[in-house]
Image (cartoon, helix red, strand yellow):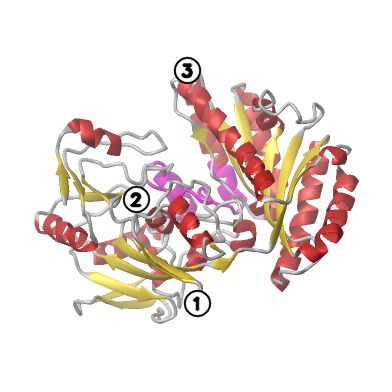
Amino acid sequence: MIVKTDIDTIEAYLTDASNLKGKSNKLIIPENKDELKTVIKELFNQNQNFVISAAGTGLTGGRVPKDDTIISIEKLNNILEINPEKKFVRVEPGVTLNQLEEAISLYNLFLPPNPTEKNSSLGGNVVNNSSGSRSFKYGSIRNYVEALEIILSNGETFNLNRGNNFADGNKLSLITDEKSQYNIEFDEITPPNTKHSGGYYLKYNMDAIDLFIGSEGTLGVISEIKLSVAIIPEKVLGLLVFFDDEYNLLEFTEKIREKSLITNKVNIDTNSDIAARLIEFFDEKSLDLIRNKYPQIPAESKGAIWIEQEYSENFENEILEKWFEIISKYSLLADSTWVATNEKEHNNFREFRHQIPLTVNEIISRNGMRKIGTDTAVPSYNFREYYFYVKEKLTELQIDYVVFGHIGDSHLHANIFPKNEAETKKALDFYEMIMLKAINLGGTVSAEHGIGKIKKNYLKMMIGDKGITSMKKIKNILDPKNLLGKGNLFD
């Protein structure tokens, strides 16, 4: 076990990608699961608050300490089992997405949800219920968590397997390996009718494992994860479609969203109809931001849509014809569409997608200000109203911005980069307006990044005092000393 108390070492663990800064005077790095359990027991006996630190890629301050002891899981990074026949993996929580993808690709397997940040840890992905570009087809990581080993703040351990323990209505009973029983009675929280990652999953007759997925490190410490994986598709088609008209871009998106949702339900790999697995959006300002690196972007483009579809090679020509037929109906720039059918071309698309947030972060760093970015989503039937409201308010700000994201899920990231404190205040006012608008349209304040310490006030706006009280009741049962992840989700 590694223990550090010098500020120079601890400094790197005091923040995450949100740039929220915390304070701590002790860092503990267990080198195996037994050490993790031992240190948690010791901190419990000492009544010492602690926070779990994963890869530090979070955007809501979840790992940022508030005078807590920091426990880093970076050394718990072993892939324990890859089972190609039954299509599952078992991993420790510090394994990164990059590490997992590289290992399972050797067995022709992949993790379908595709969380965006490849340096993130799987433990962090599970506690935040992360998703990514392919969530349009595959949903969030919740759908792929088959089992969890969880250490409570007192050092006792749950082993939960999906399908083995369900709530009886609103009553849930959990028994630790040490034979302690925890009886939980909860109020159901109805989630928004959209992609959502904010607060505890509380649903009548729920599977017990779902309580811990998305709990943001407030109920227990994940020490082992079992994930289902899938066979890599035979072929993937990528299209980057440019539009000369914003309204036509939205019409196109609605059309292919509807068609793809229907076709994906059939779930036939060799289907020759349109069936996108991701639908990503880049507004005109996003394209302008990187035109110097990609001069082949059409000058007339008012926005772009990136699409991927899985298919059998036998249907390649037929699928391409169908895509270009529908693209031509909605864009005069159809001939400028970029096409990817091999790994090199797909990597070029991913690099294009990555360049936009990378350039935004470079500008923010140069300005010396914090980035302000939304993570809201709304039901698809309210998306147009939401989209034009966001654009109207951004225009009024007169501050540099870009909008991009997962338009297939009606989930966009509006990124604002202020140059001074006055612009930062205006941007924060905009941020609150957008949160309230998303809530009023039946959406969420957090589609994929969680709540952490930064968005807890907005979570309360969304689920109300009753929802927060319901979550706190569960927290008090499983973490009665309130030692774990203080300040995440609620005060």
Amino acid type at mark 2: Phe
Element marked by disc 2: loop
Distance from disc 3 to disc 2, alpha carbons, whole Å, reads 30 Å
The answer to whether 371 appears left or right of 443 in the picture is left
Q: Which residue is mark 2?
A: 490
Distance from disc 1 to disc 2, alpha carbons, whole Å, reads 39 Å
Tell me, yes or no, if residue 273 can be seen here.
no
Which residue is more in the foreground, 56 or 372? Answer: 56
Distance from disc 1 to disc 3, alpha carbons, whole Å, reads 54 Å
Where residue 136 appears, x then y in whole percent? 64, 57
- As drawn, the label of residue 86 is 1
Amino acid type at mark 1: Lys
* Residue located 81% across and 38% down the image: 243
Which residue is more in the foreground, 95 or 304? Answer: 95
- As drawn, the label of residue 180 is none
The label nearer to you, 3 versus 2, is: 3
| Mark earlier in primary sequence (1, 2) | 1
| Mark earlier in primary sequence (1, 3) | 1
Magenta-tinted stretch: 435-464
Where residue 336 appears, x then y in whole percent? 83, 37
The answer to whether 181 appears left or right of 5 in the picture is right
